[in-house]
Image (spheres, helix red, strand yellow):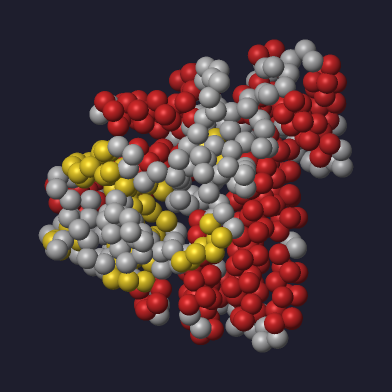
Amino acid sequence: MTKRDERLEAGWNFEHSYARLPQLFSSRINLTPVSSPQLVILNEKLATSLGLSIEALQSEEGVAVLAGSRIPEGAEPLAQAYAGHQFGNFTMLGDGRAVLLGEHMTSQGERLDIQLKGSGRTPYSRGGDGRASLGPMLREYIISEAMHGLGIPTTRSLAVVTTGESVIRENDLPGAIMTRVAASHLRVGTFEYASQWGNVEDLRVLAEYTLQRHFPDVGRIEDVENRYLHLFQEIIKRQAILIAKWQLVGFIHGVMNTDNMALSGETIDYGPCAFMDTYDPATVFSSIDRQGRYAYGNQPNIGSWNLARFAEAILPLLHDNQSEAVELAQGALSEYTTLYYDTWIAGMRAKLGIFNEELEDEALIKDLLSMMDTYHADYTNTFLALTFNTVEDIVLSGTPEFIQWHTLWQERLERQPESKDAAHELMRNSNPAVIPRNHRVEEALEAAVKDGDYSVMEQLLDALSNPYAHSPEQVVYATLPEESTRPYRTFCGT
């Protein structure tokens, strides 16, 4: 049994609103201690923002908590139940290797889930060992912090600890546990689970909880005509905005199953994720996505597909008459495309230094992307070259199509009232100097896992912390990888 430590003064302030939901939504857990936990990395800025003591978290007792070997005062460990469509196929899931310690309440009144990922078996492990290896936990730490730096809603990583134990995958790998901080772990799959294995009242309780937790303004409107339709509309809005922001920076989630769509609107579950180098809408990195279901260019449509599964789950709440409920759901979902497009095109205008709107903007943007696709241009560096007027450095330079496009773009900038300096500043703030390029991430992971050298990762994280700084130190991270005949592949890996 895991020790419960009452002396630890890290500053944890736990509440347990999710645990008060009907019993079918979770299972209480006894954590399994690990042999010799060691702190690999602690997110000190995040810890400070949570009101936690860095010194206490770094202590022997603090590391034991981060490893699941001690339970902090006030925690009530549980594993959450949910289902999901994985690559289009519905299945029962649940936290098979993650445990929720509770909801930490900050001094600002913010409620945040504290979850240990890789902490051992749960009732939902489905034959797995419930453990995780060091590489994937560090990958999630790096990518989630990069997303935070880019201003994209995301779960975050508080810490990674090694366990002193091996996990067996294809080889023996060092075991690790990551502490994830999230607005919540409510998912589309949570509602699919309630719909399949609960009753209408369970659905209603879950919907009310989601309203209170993430949409309190809607939840307080007593005279709203249909509060659950409002809930659906708000979730649609957040997902449309989130996925548009992914597209704007070339992020590919890799496994957009419905259990990986958080209702809070945060990016969650960084498994086979990666950032696109060469622009190509068909880009897929995940080794298991052989049909390209979750390719970069498909992500907006998959977002809509996942939301349709959410709608199916909540139909009994939308209207007593199923036909009426379907009509309401379809009407709400029809707004997704517009919400996504409006966010995306506004972001693309900003990347090109455009403040106002003209009908021809869509053609200007899509012509540039088409050229980038044709000439295999790097997505991030093309926009950087436009930002700093170094277009001679990109593969598009000198081509007749680009020369013509560049002229049209300059004329477009001349037609807006804002100055060229203002346009340049807008582009600086919209085009990151650095993204977590795949070869840099792999370099950091190899140094950490194989050699125990975390300095490469720490330097990368420092560069990623403020991607719009455009500092001299960030220039090296814009360098492209050497050409390879082998396509880059990512793995779900645990």
Taking the spot 55% from the left edge, 28% from the top edge, the residue there is 487
Point out residue 355 in the picture as x, y percentages from the top left corner: 75, 38
Count of all numbered marks drawn on residues in the image = 0
Looking at the rendering, in which quadrant would you find the N terminus? bottom left
Compared with 4, 456 (above or below) is above
Left or right of 248: which side holds 46? left
* Outermost residue toward the bottom in this view: 320
Residue 244 visible somewhere in the drawing: no
Residue nearest the observer in this picture, 332 or 391: 332
Point out residue 435 in the picture as x, y percentages from the top left corner: 52, 31
Q: Quadrant of residue 55?
A: top left
Taking the spot 50% from the left edge, 60% from the top edge, the residue there is 259
Residue 402 visible somewhere in the drawing: yes
Compared with 197, 430 (above or below) is above
Point out residue 326 in the picture as x, y percentages from the top left corner: 72, 75
Taking the spot 43% from the left edge, 30% from the top edge, the residue there is 441
Taking the spot 40% from the left edge, 43% from the top edge, the residue there is 493
Left or right of 145: which side holds 353? right
Compared with 148, 61 (above or below) is below
Left or right of 203: which side holds 426? right
Point out residue 281 in the picture as x, y percentages from the top left corner: 68, 37
